Image (spheres, rainbow, N blue to C red):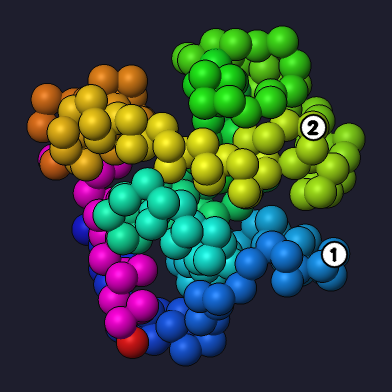
C-alpha cells in the first residue's frame, strides 16, 4: 500500500501525465481511426499509461457526472479503480465481471445493458468469465464489435449505466463513500472510508481534479 501510494503521488509522474496527455475534450466520436481504439484498449502496466487511457473518456464521464450530479471526478476514479480505463478489461479472477466498470452480468442487466450469454448472476460466475475470455479472443480485441455484442464494453452505455447506478446507491445510503463501497460489495462496509477500495478511488479523484485545475 505504501509503495503504491508513493508511486501515485510522484510529482514527476503526475507532471508527465498532465503535460503529455491532457485529453479533456476528446471523445469516441473523434476516434475514427482504428489505431486509436487499439491503443486505448492495449495493456499498459505503468501508472502513467493507466491514467492516460482513462483520460480518453473525460468528455463522456464529465457529462455523466454532471447529468446525475455526481461528485466531480468520482465516476472517472471509479473507472480507473475498476478497469484501469480499459473498456475491454475482464476481472482478473475470471468471475464474470467486465468492462470499464466491471459489471457482473446480473447487475448489468438490472442497469439496462445487453449482456452476452445467458448468465444473470450478480455474483461470481466463472463459466461466464470463460465465455467472455473466449469472446474477446475470437473478436481479436475489436472494440467496435465487442461493444455491440456486450454493452458492458460500450463506453457510452456502460458509463450511463454506472453513473445512474452509483446515484441510486447514493440516494439509498446518503453517502458517496457508502455508495462506492456498495458498488463494490453489494452492501457498504461498516467503515467504508477505511477500505482500500474507497481510499484508492478518492486518491484517483483528487488527481483528476488537480489536473483539471492546471
Q: Which residues are magenta?
A: 194-213
SS state under label 2? helix
Q: Is residue 188 shown above or below 90?
A: above
Residue depicted at x 16% and y 33%? 174
Could you say where residue 170 lies in the image, as x and y percent from the top left?
Answer: 25, 35
> Is disc 2 surrounded by few (<14), some (14 to 19) or many (20+) residues within 10 Å?
some
Q: Per the image, is 210 magenta?
A: yes
The answer to which of marks 2 and 1 sits earlier in the sequence is 1
Residue at point 41%, 32% (across, down): 165
Residue 210 position, x and y percent, is 29, 76
Question: 96 or 165, which lies in front?
Answer: 165
The C terminus appears in which quarter of the rendering? bottom left
Residue at 39% in and 86% down: 15
Q: Which mark, by number, is residue 34?
A: 1
- Residue 51 appears at what percent x and percent y? 48, 66
- Residue beneath label 2, please? 149
Amino acid at each position: 500500500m505504501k509503495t503504491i501510494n508513493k508511486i501515485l503521488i510522484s510529482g514527476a509522474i503526475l507532471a508527465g501525465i498532465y503535460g503529455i496527455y491532457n485529453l479533456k475534450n476528446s471523445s469516441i466520436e473523434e476516434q475514427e481511426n482504428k489505431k486509436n481504439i487499439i491503443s486505448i484498449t492495449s495493456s499498459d502496466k505503468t501508472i502513467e499509461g493507466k491514467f492516460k487511457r482513462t483520460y480518453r473518456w473525460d468528455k463522456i464521464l464529465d457529462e455523466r457526472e454532471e447529468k446525475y450530479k455526481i461528485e466531480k471526478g468520482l465516476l472517472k476514479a471509479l473507472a480507473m479503480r475498476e478497469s484501469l480505463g480499459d473498456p475491454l478489461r475482464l476481472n482478473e479472477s475470471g468471475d464474470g465481471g467486465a468492462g470499464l466498470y466491471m459489471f457482473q452480468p446480473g447487475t448489468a442487466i438490472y442497469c439496462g445493458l445487453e449482456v452476452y450469454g445467458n448468465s444473470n448472476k450478480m455474483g461470481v460466475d466463472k463459466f461466464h468469465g470463460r465465455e467472455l475470455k473466449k469472446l474477446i479472443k475470437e473478436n481479436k480485441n475489436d472494440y467496435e464489435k465487442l461493444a455491440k455484442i456486450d454493452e458492458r464494453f460500450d463506453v457510452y452505455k456502460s458509463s450511463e449505466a454506472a453513473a445512474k447506478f452509483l446515484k441510486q446507491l447514493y440516494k439509498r445510503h446518503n453517502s458517496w463513500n457508502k455508495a462506492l463501497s456498495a458498488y463494490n460489495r453489494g452492501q457498504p462496509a461498516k467503515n467504508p472510508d477505511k477500505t482500500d477500495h474507497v481510499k484508492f478511488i478518492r486518491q484517483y479523484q483528487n488527481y483528476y481534479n488537480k489536473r483539471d485545475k492546471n
